[in-house]
Image (spheres, coloured by chain):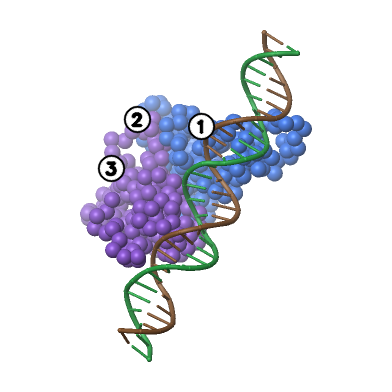
Chain colours: A purple, B blue, C brown, D green
DNA sequence: GTTGCCATGTAAGTGACTCTTACATAAGTT
DNA sequence: AACTTATGTAAGAGTCACTTACATGGCAAC
């Protein structure tokens, strides 16, 4: 897998188990889905006993939550990068955020499902809640710029939420293969520009 | 649970195990999520040994698939009913389909996640694929009526797909509680009419 | 340096789950 | 009445999450 982290163990103690477990779980979730993953298998990949992970994570959900949090950071960074690629206030900047979102989902469906799937005990996790709001903030900012309105405006929140639902739904339908015979887009971009224009108006 | 199906067993054979298992699984999935469900618990609820279900379903995924298929039928019926409540070609008729979709998700998040979640081995199931297309057909029909275009028109497919993604995304974000601080709709109807108007134009 | 603390590892075990195998029971067919 | 088939049980193999008791070694205080 990863060769920059020494899997050979010089001593009794591992030294980097927590990070290596998260990496192993990410790979496993990608390979077998959030349910298919097992703590025992992750421990095996890290070369430790099946009890060792429980020194770093209270239980299975907490381990998954750590992976979800890390994934959400990557998602926000990607959205931010997409936004920065186009002039502020353009429809393209909004579509680019959507493209980053869809790419993230397609590039790692397992983690995406984990991030947005309410896997076991995510409900009230304030960390994930806050990271989610941070992602939405990017959409909010881009929307406000297009509409020439302050971010706090109700219309901005409304339109931003509409955009979010579209892109979220498209991402899920894509990775869940529910779009097979229904609508074969030549690419995501046409779809993303289409909804951006429909929801924010054809200006930009 | 259900009192119309006799759980008392007069004889060695159950007589109605298959249907009763599906009902038990539906309840369990609703109570503990698609992952929290176990075949053993379903068997226990039906009052049979833990090996009995395997006479009716090859494995766990096949049992879940049966529940998903039944759920998809209910979804299509609900969408159809929503469509019929408003004059053909009105934005209301489209919004009503969306409302049925959201209600279905909120009313049974477990089954909804099961239906649209690619749980284990759904990928190529032609039955679910076909039932999904049947659901999309309802949206397609309503969209064509609003746009005064034939169902086969590319624009109709495009707009119908956009509507689907929005409603699907809204449903998922709602049941996954990702919408907490972001956008508190007074109800779904305003949102549904909003996206219908944005995507299909303000006629209707 | 020695001593003791403590974070982090292991071994072994509990109870639950999926799914298999071998067998028992009933119901219909010939 | 005998055969076949559908549908149940009992027992068990293999896996998993998680616990408990114990082992190891890095590090601070002395």
Q: Regarding mark 3 in the picture, which secondary structure is present there?
A: helix
Identify the chain of the residue marked 3, using the numbered disc in the image. Answer: A
Gap in angstroms between the C-alphas marked 2 and 1: 20 Å
Q: Residue at coordinates 30% horizontally, 41% vertically from top-left?
A: A188
* Residues behind callouts 3 and 2 on a single chain: no
Q: Mark 1 or mark 3: which is in front?
A: 3
Residue A189 shows which numbered tag? 3
**Residue B76 against residue B1 in the figure, above or below:** above
Q: Position of residue B118 (x, y in %)?
A: 45, 40
Density class for disc 1 (Cα within 10 Å; few <14, some 14-19, many ≥20) is: some
Q: Mark 3 or mark 2: which is in front?
A: 3
Q: Earlier in the sequence, mark 2 or mark 1?
A: 1
Q: Residue at coordinates 63% horizontally, 32% vertically from top-left?
A: B18
**Residue C18 against residue A115 in the figure, above or below:** above
Q: Position of residue B56 (x, y in %)?
A: 59, 31
Identify the chain of the residue marked 1, using the numbered disc in the image. Answer: B
- In which quadrant is the N terminus of chain B drawn? top right
**Residue B185 against residue B61 in the figure, above or below:** below
Residue B99 shows which numbered tag? none
Occupied quadrant, residue C5:
bottom left
Residue B88 shows which numbered tag? 1
Q: Residue at coordinates 65% horizontally, 36% vertically from top-left?
A: B20
Tag 2 residue = B154
Q: Mark 2 or mark 1: which is in front?
A: 2
Gap in angstroms between the C-alphas marked 3 and 2: 17 Å
Q: Regarding mark 1 in the picture, which secondary structure is present there?
A: loop
The reply to whether residue A186 is visible in this rendering is: yes
Identify the chain of the residue marked 2, using the numbered disc in the image. Answer: B
């Amino acid at each position: 897998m990863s060769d920059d982290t020494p899997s050979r163990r010089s001593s009794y103690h591992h030294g980097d188990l927590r990070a290596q477990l998260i990496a192993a779980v990410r790979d496993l979730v990608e390979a077998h889905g959030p349910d298919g993953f097992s703590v025992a298998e992750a421990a095996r990949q890290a070369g430790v006993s099946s009890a060792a992970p429980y020194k770093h994570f209270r239980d299975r959900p907490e381990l998954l939550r750590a992976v979800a949090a890390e994934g959400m950071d990557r998602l926000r960074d990607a959205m931010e990068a997409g936004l920065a690629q186009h002039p502020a206030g353009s429809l393209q900047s909004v579509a680019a955020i959507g493209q980053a979102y869809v790419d993230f989902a397609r590039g790692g469906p397992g983690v995406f499902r984990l991030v947005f799937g309410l896997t076991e005990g995510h409900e009230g996790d304030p960390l994930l809640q806050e990271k989610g709001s941070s992602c939405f903030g990017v959409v909010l900012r881009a929307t406000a710029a297009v509409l020439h309105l302050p971010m706090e405006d109700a219309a901005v929140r409304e339109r931003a939420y509409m955009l979010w639902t579209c892109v979220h739904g498209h991402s899920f339908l894509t990775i869940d293969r529910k779009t097979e015979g229904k609508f074969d887009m030549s690419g995501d971009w046409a779809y993303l520009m289409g909804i951006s224009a429909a929801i924010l108006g054809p200006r930009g």
